[in-house]
Amino acid sequence: MPHRHNLTTLRDMLRRREISSTELTHHFLERIDRHSDLNAFITVDEEGALAAAQQADKHLARDEHAPLTGVPLAHKDIFCTQGLLTSCGSKMLRNFISPYDATVVERLAKAGSVLVGKTNMDEFAMGSSNETSHFGPVHNPWDLQRVPGGSSGGSAAAVASRLVPGATGTDTGGSIRQPAAFCGLTGLKPSYGRVSRYGMIAFASSLDQGGPLALSAEDAALLLQCMAGFDSRDSTSIARDTADIDEGLKINLHGLRLGLPAEFFDESIDNAVLTRVREALGIFERLGATLVDVALPNSAAGIPCYYVIAPAEASSNLSRFDGVRFGHRSDQASDLLTLYENSRAEGFGEEVKRRILIGTYALSAGYYDAYYLKAQKIRRVIAQDFSKAFEQCDIIVGPTAPTTAFSLGEKTQDPVAMYLNDIFTNTVNLAGLPGLSIPAGLDEAGLPVGLQLIGQFMDEGRLLGAAHRFQQATDWHQLVPKGF
Ligand code: GLN
């Protein structure tokens, strides 16, 4: 049962030739097929995967090892993949075969990984439940009636159900961390600029970051090392090597200061979530960390601030999908204007249209100062809150989401209730910081609870190291949903 092993172990087994990449890829492809009811994948590239696996086996036979040689992986369908459908979960891009690879895709391929397919997601990464996808909702392997979280819900469901040992996701306001929490995974949103956004279809460019979804901090570190690094094709990319990530895994927790913001521990949070988070913090204490109280006084402004800035940037980014330059073209048009109108009306789903409307409104003359500019100022204040808190601690901790996975359909009629799910995650994007979600146990219904660790800018090494120590002392990250 090779799917029971994590990515690092599989990588080592491949190197020792205890299993071939072709066998492993076949095994995972069969699982993807058997569990197609989860709807975790939009595209499965059997032929491409087996060809890449064969190639990897040739390298392995000669002991030529790249960091991930022969390891099967999946990419969120927001990453452009040459020659493969890249739909971004939208009808708008239902037929878009990308002519090039995103930097993340290119780097993970160079690292020797085998791409098995593209995962389902909320349309244009807008959502917290994977229910806005044009390709239908994804089911949470822990309870098929529940959502896997979003927007990287397909990637999270695929890794949690062991259809792949790791996958990529993107996180604009929580889309890696919240699905990781809902599916019992380790998910990292890197510091803004650490991972190239080139070829990652843009939602809100000042917030978007790609990152890994994995079964452990060690696996996430391995994936991040392959994904991260400077890219001249992304003007916000930061030149920083990845030495800190290796170093970070070796850290000692003695004297590590964990900051608990009162704002992340209020009564509106699910009881079981709070209990599990507090228990996890107890374990960190036993391992040598100290807990300190900190304050993030402007956290409550995070949701309104994010839901002005993200739609504003989205309305601009999505203007290219007009049926002429990019995207679905309506055949119901008599002139240019109706061609634009009908193409966009037919190609975009309801949530995406809602965001475009909000964003266009917030950016329009007369409202720009009142909404967009104001939100930018609040964003600065939120970032300053984090800087102040980090004067007293090394890592900020709290729940990843206020609840465990909710039921399919539960929040689809109430966009604000859906947005509130990001309450602990989106301030991290506004401040450009790294955030990690790790499994911290189950609630009374047997659903995973996520613990969030927030680091200082470019401090991924320490985050992953702290999580790695925690995972050496616990086995929450090894739980497998029943039936998988
Ligand atoms: N749920 C948030 C939203 O809908 C975050 C999405 C994301 O991180 N891509 O915008």
Image (cartoon, rainbow, N blue to C red):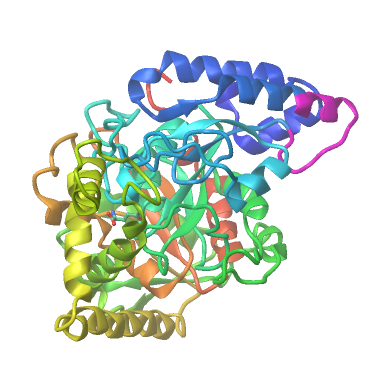
Q: Is 199 left, or right, of 90 in this rendering?
A: right
Residue 409 highlighted magenta (yes or no): no
Residue 63 highlighted magenta (yes or no): yes
Q: Quadrant of the C terminus?
A: top left
Label count reads: 0
Q: Which residues are magenta?
A: 55-69
Q: Is 144 left, or right, of 483 in this rendering?
A: left
Residue 296 rendering spot, x and y as whole percentages: 30, 78
Along the line of sight, the residue nearer the viewer: 230 or 28: 230
**Quarter for ligand 1?**
bottom left
Residue 253 appears anywhere in the view: no
Q: Quadrant of the N terminus?
A: top right
Residue, x 57% and y 71% (percent of image)? 235
Along the line of sight, the residue nearer the viewer: 180 or 123: 123
Residue, x 18% and y 81% (percent of image)? 365
Along the line of sight, the residue nearer the viewer: 207 or 411: 207
Residue 48 rendering spot, x and y as whole percentages: 63, 25
